[in-house]
Amino acid sequence: MSAAVPAATDRLGRIRIDGVSKSFGTRRVLDGVSLTVEPGSVIALVGPSGSGKSTLLRAINHLETIDAGSITIDGNYIGYTRHGDRLYELRESEVLRRRTAVGMVFQNFHLFPHLTVLENIVIAPLSLRRADRPAAEARARELLARVGLAEYAEAYPRRLSGGQQQRVAIARALALEPAVLLFDEPTSALDPELVGEVLAVIRELAHGGTTLIIVTHEIGFAREVADHVVFLDHGSIREQGPPDVVLVNPSHARTRAFLRHPTATETPESDHESPASPINAPQV
């Protein structure tokens, strides 16, 4: 099933997913998924646990390889190069360079515990020589102010609440000015009283013109911020469209069944039994 999200522009951040499949052992987690996301769109990926949402998100950023199909951002492959009709995986150094077009916010923050909040944000721009230290620090302070944490620049992550750490992670993802931001269940590791502060930051970003793809079980939030909702089940797109259609008056029986059981939307995503992330630290 494929559809183009409306409102194409000449901005960066266009994602094209063509026939993507992925299996872990004998289990097919993604089954021929196709989707086109136009620049500036806000997409919510919803569905039951194990439906493939997180795997699809991680495939966009080449944190998961794919078995078939292709994914491009503004016409460029993140983890592959094409020669003729075949795709070949790039060296990790080239993958990292291309991945700077995509910011990602994980469930569990992945901040460096031995670095201050400010250093967590400037490390990527400095390592990639995107800015000198004064410029990188100035930008980091701007981003901390944007997420409401200006006074925590010199603090260490252990002194922050989970909600504050996640907001730092969002600021870090913005530091390289990516064309695309990916959110993998950004509130699932938080205590309920901290969820609102993180959703408020994402809500503000949704109006900023950056392409956002959000894997979420917060159905009310998805309806509020998304331009387009994609419902996945057993690795396939069962239904997609405007949130007021998919989440209020869905046409597919499986979507209706899912929405009738709100407790199912509170379980963290688990597409397979491998570790939640193949990386142990932020991307730089």
Image (cartoon, grey):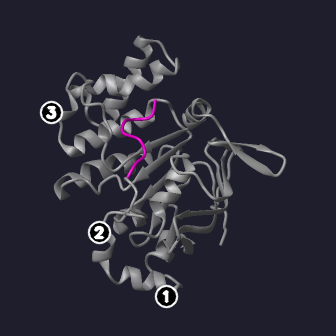
Residue placed under numbered mark 3 in the picture: 159
Pointers 3 and 1 in contact (CB under 8 A)? no
* Classed neighbour count for the residue bearing mark 3: other residues with Cα under 10 Å, few (<14), some (14–19), many (≥20): few
Please, what secondary structure does the residue beneath circle 3 have? helix
Q: What amino acid is labelled 1 in the image? A: Ala
Q: Identity of the amino acid at label 2?
A: Glu
Magenta region: which residues?
A: 276-284
Q: Which residue is mark 2?
A: 266
Q: Is residue 249 visible?
A: no
Residue type, numbered disc 3:
Arg
Q: Which residue is mark 1?
A: 253
- Image location of residue 150, percent across then percent down: 26, 28
Q: Residues within 10 Å of mark 1 (few under 14, many from 20)?
A: few
Q: Is residue 239 above or below residue 77?
A: below
Q: Where the N terminus falls, by quadrant?
A: bottom right
Q: Percent x, y for residue 12?
A: 63, 41
Q: From this viewpoint, is residue 16 visible? A: yes
**First in residue order: circle 2 vs circle 1:** 1
- Tell me residue 6's x, y (percent): 64, 60
- Name the chief secondary structure element in magenta: loop
Quarter of the figure with residue 81: top right
Q: In the displayed structure, does residue 55 sit left or right of residue 84? A: left
